[in-house]
Image (cartoon, helix red, strand yellow):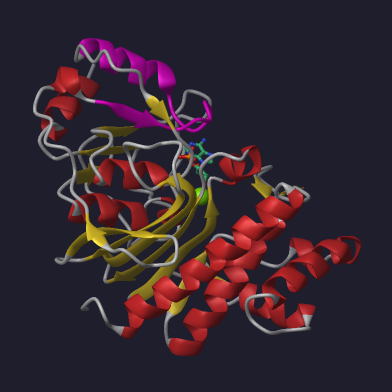
Amino acid sequence: MDQDSPEVMTALQTAIRASALCERIRMDLAGGEILLKSDRSPVTIADYGSQAIICKLIRERFPDDTIVAEEDSKEIRKPDRSEILEQVTNYVNAFIRTDSSEEVCSWIDFGSNSVTDRFWALDPIDGTKGFLRGDQYAIALALIEKGRVKLGILACPNLYSDIYHPLGEKGCLFLALKGLGSFQMDSTGANKRPIFVSETKRPSEAIITESVEADHADHLTHQRLAQKLNISKPSLRMDSQAKYGILARGEVTLYLRVPSSVEPGYKENIWDHAAGSIIAEEAGGRVTDVLGRPLDFSSGIKMEKNRGILVSNGILHEVVLKALEM
Ligand code: AMP
Ligand code: MG
């Protein structure tokens, strides 16, 4: 797959549109009404709108491909949710013409749970809690063939593009293609430039990134690991797979995700890591679980064979794995 292949073009176009939709909703409604799914995780009209747009375009261009996506239309089809469905439809209509809520639901439901030989993994809004707080979130899309990630895109509409100017212009796109490297672009897709992980060799000089949400990772264990490695710089807490993006562009050295003590048996979702992992790897980084095993994108929507996540600049990977054995 080269840079100009239809898969890359489609993925970029659709991620750019979905991120524009998410930002519009964030500006208009500060995220809008929050719905709670059966597992009590939050979902917003932006999650539904983003998934509708992305699934519609991918299905149109690649009718034979499976899309494994986080949301479905069950909740917004309920009669008492009709106002929310109408909002979703109106926002989607601003990007792809439709006046039918039924049509929008059918686009959302192009997403399924079945992992096949070739499929797209989609998180329409990764880091919904960050989105609602006005912090970081990402639209994450990956193409997986025979269990291997071939293409990954992260649209991070609220992430500063210049690491030396965190208060400067917001909005970045990260793209990685297997064997061809990782790139950062402006939120429009312009100004594409290659990115690389940091060359930090001394563990003590590393910078850690981790979740904002304490329930998503074991911050205390991360802190102990930092002490063990004499890391003095404070950890950078950030929502969503934007963490993979900032590691890939050399801003931080390590992304730690040791399962939290609240849910020690938690299994990660493939759409939470597929796009991010190829972006870190193609920038020169290494991605495994906290026991050093490769991430498994072939068994189902849950990464059953993995426990937590460790991402590094490659150089420091073994040292950190060893330190995690504590
Ligand atoms: P982050 O923004 O990196 O904290 O990750 C957000 C993702 O964490 C969401 O997309 C959820 O799928 C995922 N998540 C939800 N509960 C947990 C948990 N107990 N442990 C780890 N990740 C979780
Ligand atoms: Mg997610």
Looking at the image, which residue is at 43% across and 24% down?
218
Compared to residue 1, the image places residue 84 above or below, namely: above
Q: Is residue 219 magenta?
A: yes
User: 131 or 216: nearer the eye?
Assistant: 131
Residue beneath the point at 28% across and 65% down: 147
Is the residue 35 above or below the residue 102 in the image?
A: above
In the foreground, 27 or 79: 27
Relative side of 73 to 284, left or right:
right
**Magenta span includes 283:** no
Relative to 128, does residue 224 appear above or below in the rendering? above
Image-quadrant location for residue 190: bottom left
**Residue 20 x/y as whole percent:** 57, 64
Residue 110 place in picture, x, y as percent: 57, 77
On screen, residue 63 versus residue 309, left or right, reads: right
* On-image quarter of the N terminus: bottom left
Which residues lie in the magenta part? 207-228
Do we see residue 306 in this rendering? Answer: no
Would you identify the image quadrant in which residue 286 lies?
top left
